[in-house]
Image: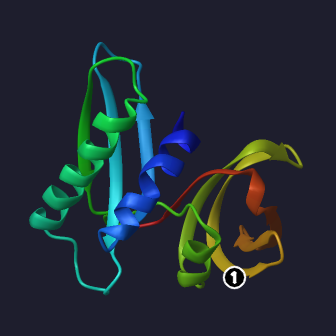
Amino acid sequence: MKARLIRLLEPAIEAAGYELVELEFSSASRRALLRVYIDRTDGERVTVDDCAEVSRTVSAVMDTADPIERAYELEVSSPGFDRPLRKRAHFERFLGSEVRLELAAPLEGRKRFKGQLVAVEGEELIMEVDGRTWRLPLGQIDKARLVA
């Protein structure tokens, strides 16, 4: 569902002049929640007005495509200090930063990593974690965030 929603919403959000940083969809409770994290492409801070504009854009796309079959709440916000990292460009932008991430499948018995983002080479992310260099496959990263 998440990948489908990203494919659906990302072009409209970009056309409005924003970047879709991350998207979360949870249907675990009575009312589903669609949370959209955006950033401005001009480097300025995201304002409440930006969130309202993107909310209108997302609502229009969702109303037309109707990909969620039940009632849901929509939240649009800035990525915050613990910014989610989803794309290769996100990792490249924050080289040298401290990152917390989780892999979809264990690597050498480990799924969770917290350390310094050193490089992005080919299809791998290079991190220094607990004094060791790890080469993590970009395609296996399930969740990643900057450490605030």
Residue 95, given in percent of the width and then of the height, sits at 60, 83
Closer-to-camera residue (48/9): 9
Q: Quadrant of the N terminus?
A: top right
Compared across the picture, whether 60 is left or right of 105 comes to left
Q: Is residue 82 above or below residue 68?
A: below
Closer-to-camera residue (140/147): 140
- Asked whether residue 35 is in view, the answer is yes
Q: Is residue 121 above or below residue 109?
A: below
Compared across the picture, whether 51 is left or right of 19 comes to left
Say how many tags the image has. Answer: 1
Q: Residues within 10 Å of mark 1 (few under 14, many from 20)?
A: some
Identified by mark 1, the residue type is: Val
| Residue in view at x 28 percent, y 63 percent | 78
- Asked whether residue 79 is in view, the answer is no
Structure colour scheme = rainbow
Residue 76, given in percent of the width and then of the height, sits at 25, 51
Q: Quadrant of the C terminus?
A: bottom left
Closer-to-camera residue (2/134): 2
Residue 40, given in percent of the width and then of the height, sits at 30, 76
Residue 98, given in percent of the width and then of the height, sits at 54, 73
Q: Residue furthest front?
A: 64
| Residue in view at x 76 percent, y 56 percent | 139
Q: Is residue 116 above or below residue 113?
A: below
| Residue in view at x 33 percent, y 45 percent | 61
Compared across the picture, whether 12 is left or right of 55 comes to right
| Residue in view at x 85 percent, y 43 percent | 109
Compared across the picture, whether 71 is left or right of 52 comes to right
The image quarter in which residue 74 lies: top left
Q: Residue furthest left?
A: 49
The image quarter in which residue 87 lies: bottom right
Local secondary structure at mark 1: strand
Provide the residue designation for mark 1.
118
